[in-house]
Amino acid sequence: MVDAPKQPPVAEPSGEPAPAEPARTMPRLPRSAGSLIALALLFVIWELVVRVGNVPAYLLPPPSTVFLRIFSDRDFILYNAGVTMIAVTAGFALSIVVSIPLAAVLAQYAWIEHTVYPLLVASQTIPKVALAPLMVVWFGFGLTPKILITFLICFFPIVVDTLVGFRSLSKEVRWLAKSMGVSRWHMFTQFQVPAALPNIFAGIKVASTLAVVGAVVGEFVAADSGLGYQLIVANGLLDVELSIAILVVLSVLGILVFAVVDVCERLALPWHVSQRHNDLAAGGR
Amino acid sequence: MTRVVIDNLSKVYKTRRDRIHALDRISLTIGEGEFVSVVGPSGCGKSTLMSLVSGLEFPTSGEVSLDGVPIRAPITDVGIVFQTDVLLEWRTVLSNVMIQAEMRKLDRATYRARAEELLRTTGLDGFGGKYPHELSGGMRQRASICRALVHDPSLLLMDEPFGALDALTREMMVLELHRLWLATRKSILFITHDIEEAVFLADRVVVMTPRPGRIAEIITPNLPEARDMRIKQIPEFGAAVGRIRTIFEETGILKTI
């Protein structure tokens, strides 16, 4: 998206700017309103199906009792959510900190890319879930294996998208920079990095939705607290109500991480975000 | 004084399948303060010629020299305008122009004033704070011309800069460029596929034919220095345009009906 779609050459000799969008006739709802209504509708249907169909609560409890359970067990849930979020945040941050410089190095030297990139791709064919038990063997119980699994799951999409971003610099921009006699460092900081930022954020967004998954997988096998661990326990006790309550909380956590990234992107790339205001793909890739 | 000497220049691009002879034994000079147009159909190696003169690509054989020094690396005392505007989307218009000064470590305050002056003269007054995507195609290209001029280079290379513009904007930009050249007397290599544009602007017009890219003829139209659109009615203008058309017809680029 860096070679931005040019506006069609509007009638312009007088130096008029491109005309503004025609005013909307409908009052504008926040963009998220639609999905919130749909979600609420889903809960209503779920509630109705369970109540009308007399589904036993040990198979599928109605959402109302799930929400009540979240409320009544809020201390327990908050504590475990906190534990999970530490792993999510640390693993996610680690993946960002490692992936972007790695992609930057790959992008600078073609031979490194040719050597390392195939290995990276090959490494992704190993199911990370299957690695989790090994992590326990190597790093024991606790935070470290959780962070590492989160990291392993998040890091690939960031590397790939960042690399695409660094590669997206057109020949003309490169030439323009060279005709100004820029140093390699300036070529990187002033041209490659800004051009890559939209792709970097795209990769981080994908990773942000995976971060919670990574932490939960880690907690399945290598933890004694956290939402993932409590999910396993609740399943073992056939406490479907708590299981679903935890799933709801996990999903909220995932949305939260995504939202934080989205806000950062808006702040960092006003020129990019404003260009795709009606782009559906913008919200969730 | 001669500034750019292009001596027996050939460029062959090798692809996996075959060799593309983009330029074949081109010899040409650009004098101090001279405006040289290169006109030819697409695929005649015009853009290649520009990238070789700017030192961004290197010839297969032959040589380009600037002020007597052979070009072996990208030259920097130059302003380049590409076919596309190549504006950086993440920088505002003013900051796109100012990147020249920043990268060349020139005095910010001085060049900021110059950049604003250039934006004013090209009708972009008040648009300095806008991002490129908020501008129309013509305004974007004007901003990129400002960027090519802000550091006051003595040589200007323009590769079909008005190719993507509508006819009216284009005519206005041609007049602006002519005024600018009269005022500053930069050496300009101007590449175009528009015959009238080439003749209108230039001291000399280099006519190129494709496959391989060769110089068919170099025409000196002998038009008065200061020009406006009325010049298109004088016989010398018509003669020069007619001659170029004849060359293109003889080589089968233009068909006579």
Image (cartoon, rainbow, N blue to C red):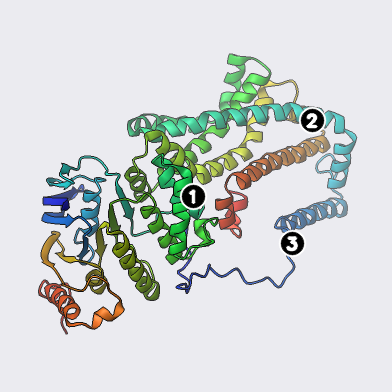
State the SS at label 3.
Answer: loop
* Residue linked to disc 1: B95
- Residue B120: % across, % down: 47, 62
Q: Secondary structure at mark 2?
A: helix
* Residue B26: x %, y % from top left: 12, 55
Query: How many neighbours does mark 1 have within 10 angstroms: few (below 14), some (14-19), or many (20 or more)?
Result: many
Establish whether labels 3 and 1 are both on one chain: no
Q: Residue at point 19% right, 61% down?
A: B44
Residue occupying image coordinates x 45% and y 47%: B110
Distance between mark 2 and mark 3 Cα atoms: 39 Å
Depth check, mark 2 against mark 3: the one in front is: 3
**Which three-letter amino acid code belongs to the residue tagged 1?**
Ser
| Residue position for label 2 | A234
- Disc count in the image? 3
Which residue position is annotated with label 3? A29
Q: Nearer the viewer, residue A94 or B47?
A: B47
Question: Is any part of residue B88 visible from this angle?
Answer: no
Task: In the rendered view, tell whether residue A103 sits above or below residue B197.
Answer: above
Q: Return the disc, 2 or 3, that comes first in the chain's sequence.
A: 3
From this view, report whether residue B120 is shown above or below residue B91: below
Q: Amino acid at mark 2?
A: Ala
Q: Pick the residue in front: A157 or B234.
A: B234
Between residue A146 and residue A163, name the one nearer to us: A163
Chain letter belonging to callout 2: A
Mark 3 to mark 1 CA distance (whole Å): 35 Å
Q: Quadrant of residue B239?
A: bottom left
Number of other residues with Cα within 10 Å of mark 3, as a class: few under 14, some 14 to 19, many 20 or more: few
